[in-house]
Amino acid sequence: MARTALTQLQDQVEAVRREAFAAGYAAAMQAIREFVAKSAVGAEPMAVQPRRRMASAAPPAAAAPARQRQPRGTATAPQRTRRSSGPRPQRGTNARLVEEVLHANAPRALPPAEIRSAIQRDKGVEIAFTSIRHALTQLEARHVAEQVADSKTWRYRAGAAASD
């Protein structure tokens, strides 16, 4: 008997919950209908407007003023050098630039960092370290440059001009 009373009570609670949900849903839908009916003066009725995706809750672009975003950290960020929009350099340009720097510092050996800064300073060209390394191996294969012993420095080969 206690079990049936408990079941009846649960059924009644469930029925009240459903009625309350239905009443709340109906009230919410009525509020939405009233809000849509009070749309902006001169606007087309909702039935005529094209349907939009419900996922975007943002107002249309024409109604909202365009905000211009300012890049983050513009005041403190260092200015980056931009690539020129000019034509692409010819093949072998990096090797030629590295060779010129090594030749200008002829008896002295230079690490790739000094080679890179010299090219930037003298020619105004920014070269990646991997490109410098590749150019150095090309020059080594042509017997124009050589690595100094087990160090990470490179120098211009003395008899390079005579052997070409």
Image: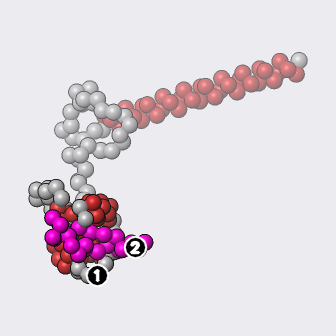
Above or below 122: residue 92: above
For label 2, the crowd category at 10 Å Cα-Cα, with few meaning under 14, some 14 to 19 and many 20 or more, is few
- Mark closer to the chain start, 2 or 1: 1
Q: Is residue 108 visible?
A: yes
Circle 1 residues within 10 Å: few <14, some 14–19, many ≥20: few
Q: Residue furthest right?
A: 1
Tag shown at residue 154:
none
Instruction: Measuring from the top left, give residue 131's x and y in whole percent.
Output: 28, 61
Q: Based on the displayed image, in which of its 4 quarters is residue 146 positioned?
A: bottom left
- Whether residue 77 appears in this view of the structure is no
**Residue 20 relative to residue 156: left or right:** right
| Residue 149 higher or lower than 15, as above or below | below
Identified at 19% across, 79% down, the residue is: 104
* Residue 61 picture location, percent across and down: 23, 46
Q: Nearer the viewer, residue 109 or 82?
A: 109
Which residue appears at 48% of the width and 32% of the height? 27
Of badges 2 and 1, nearer the viewer stands 2
Q: Is residue 119 above or below residue 27?
A: below
Separation (CA) of disc 2 from disc 1: 14 Å
Secondary structure type for disc 2: loop
Residue that label 2 marks: 149
Instruction: Residue type at mark 2: give it.
Output: Ala
How far across and down, in percent of the image, does residue 154 sit?
32, 73
The secondary structure type at the circle numbered 1 is: loop
Residue 123 part of the magenta segment: no
**Front position in the image: 155 or 120:** 155
Q: Residue at x 89, y 18 (%)?
A: 1
The span picked out in magenta is 144-164
Provide the residue designation for mark 1: 108
The quadrant the C terminus occupies is bottom left
Instruction: Please check the rendered image and state whether residue 147 is part of the magenta-colored stretch, yes or no.
Output: yes
Amino acid type assigned to the residue bearing label 1 in the image? Arg
